[in-house]
Image: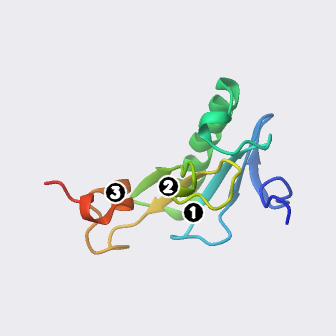
């Protein structure tokens, strides 16, 4: 089975080193993925130049999502390694628009990957 990000035809934005696309299985409307064009397993394998290209697309995608979806906030996340939940081993940065009321209590945000540690107040 090939890499879904190396062969993904439905890009929304791209630059020389990275591309952005809508997640095929979005957790909220507008959920996007930003991936390097070069096949790299995770965040720790990309170069500084690729990280800057990814950051540039995160900003561009945020502006796009603000115009098209009007979210109330964002989560940005990267899973690195199987123990962290990574299932596709080509780096992909999740840009997840968040909307008031999309979950009952959003406190803790990305800390929710460990449910018992989500709320620390």
Residue 77 location (% of width, % of height) = 50, 51
Check residue 31 in the rendering and tell me which mark sits there, or answer none: 1
Inter-mark Cα distance, 2 to 1: 19 Å
Q: Neighbour class for label 1 at 10 Å: few (<14), some, many (≥20)?
A: many
Check residue 109 in the rendering and tell me which mark sits there, or answer none: 3
Q: Residue at x 57, y 40 (%)?
A: 59
Secondary structure under tag 1 reads loop
Residue 63 location (% of width, % of height) = 56, 47
Q: Return the residue found at the far top.
A: 48
Quadrant of the rendering where the N terminus is positioned: bottom right
Closer mark to the observer between disc 1 and disc 3: 3
Q: Neighbour class for label 3 at 10 Å: few (<14), some, many (≥20)?
A: few
Q: Residue at x 44, y 54 (%)?
A: 75
Check residue 6 in the rendering and tell me which mark sits there, or answer none: none
Report which residue position mark 2 lands on. 84
Closer mark to the observer between disc 2 and disc 3: 2
**8 sits left or right of 61 in the view:** right
**19 sits left or right of 65 in the view:** right
Looking at the image, do the residues carrying marks 2 and 3 touch, with CB atoms under 8 Å apart? no
Q: Nearer the viewer, residue 92 or 44?
A: 44
């Amino acid at each position: 089975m090939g890499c879904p990000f190396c062969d993904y035809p439905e890009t929304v934005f791209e630059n020389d080193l990275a591309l952005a696309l809508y997640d095929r299985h979005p957790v909220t409307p507008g959920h996007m993925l930003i991936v390097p064009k070069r096949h790299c397993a995770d965040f720790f394998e990309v170069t500084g130049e690729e990280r800057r290209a990814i950051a540039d697309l995160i900003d561009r995608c945020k502006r796009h999502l603000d115009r098209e979806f009007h979210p109330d906030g964002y989560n940005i996340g990267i899973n690195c390694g199987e123990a962290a939940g990574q299932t596709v081993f080509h780096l992909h940065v999740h840009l997840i628009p968040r909307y008031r009321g999309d979950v009952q209590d959003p406190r803790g945000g990305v800390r929710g990957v460990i449910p018992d540690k989500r709320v620390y107040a």
